Amino acid sequence: MNILTFRTNQELNAAGAGIITGLIQTNPRAVLGLATGSTPIGIYEELVQSFKKGLVSFRLATSFNLDEYAGLPLDHPESYHTYMEQHLFRHIDLPASQRHIPNGMAADLEAECRRYDLLLEQAKQIDLQILGLGHNGHIGFNEPDQSLNSGTHVVKLRESTRQANARFFDSVEQVPTHALTMGVGMILKAKTILLVVRGKDKAEIVHEALTGPIRTEIPASLLQTHPNLVVLLDAEAGRCFHDKQ
């Protein structure tokens, strides 16, 4: 586990984007696991700038997103399809046929999960998986539970998760109650995991997840078992690591 703390968001964004561009430059056919939410936006902005400067091309790469809300039209302003278009896809040369996001509007969500797992199996392995961290320790939309699913599955979102995401909607009532998410087992199969955490409200949970007991009630704690985990923290998210040194 390699934990890096940055004084500024700009430094963190540049470091995260540098890891990704370095991978693509050495392995143009790399498979990327992508995350959404507010955490990776700055990293995506840096990737777009690197592409515009001619430093990197995504033409041969493939991407798989972690998750998507169930029941939101793909063109809904808060769907993760829309998010990825706005923040990354429309600005780079990654072909549409090589971008994969679960379809939350599928008539049969269980069948959609099986389809997504098949695509992941065909890709063989994600080279770099980007993750954020939920306030309750969830990764993707894998919520705390007595046991965790390995493959892509439909999950009922906890009220705390819906409340945390309500800032992106007009009200919490508009936040979907369910989502499709890549399972923890698939996440852990990635060659490298890049966990990005920002803000003082995540300081305690990221410290507990990475130093406390490994348990399914904190899904992110399972990242401790990964052989190549890189953690990028801003100063506020990393304060517990410094306080307890």
Image (cartoon, grey):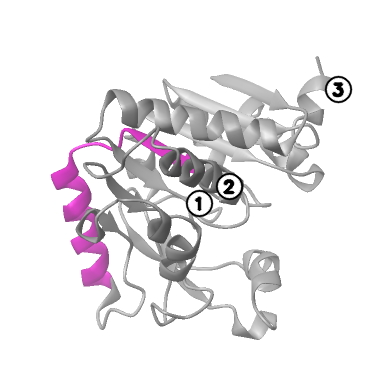
Give the residue at the far top of this rendering. 245
Q: Position of residue 137 (x, y in %)?
A: 62, 47
Vertical position of residue 134 compared to residue 167: above or below: above
User: Mark 3 or 2, which is nearer the eye?
Assistant: 3
Which residue corresponds to the image point at 25% horizontal and 79% vertical from the top-left? 108
Name the element at disc 1.
loop
Q: Which of 68 and 7 is in front in this view?
A: 7
Stretch in magenta: 110-131
The CA span between labels 3 and 2 is: 25 Å
Q: Where is residue 29 in the image (x, y as percent from the top left)?
A: 22, 35
User: Mark 2 or 1, which is nearer the eye?
Assistant: 2
Q: What residue type is labelled 3?
A: Asp
Q: Where is residue 233 in the image (x, y as percent from the top left)?
A: 68, 32
The CA span between labels 2 and 1 is: 7 Å
The C terminus: image quadrant: top right
User: Which label sits on residue 217?
Assistant: 2
Sooner in the amino-acid sequence: mark 2 or mark 1 = 1
Sooner in the amino-acid sequence: mark 3 or mark 2 = 2
Contact check, label 2 and label 1, Cβ < 8 Å? yes
Q: Name the residue under label 3.
A: 243
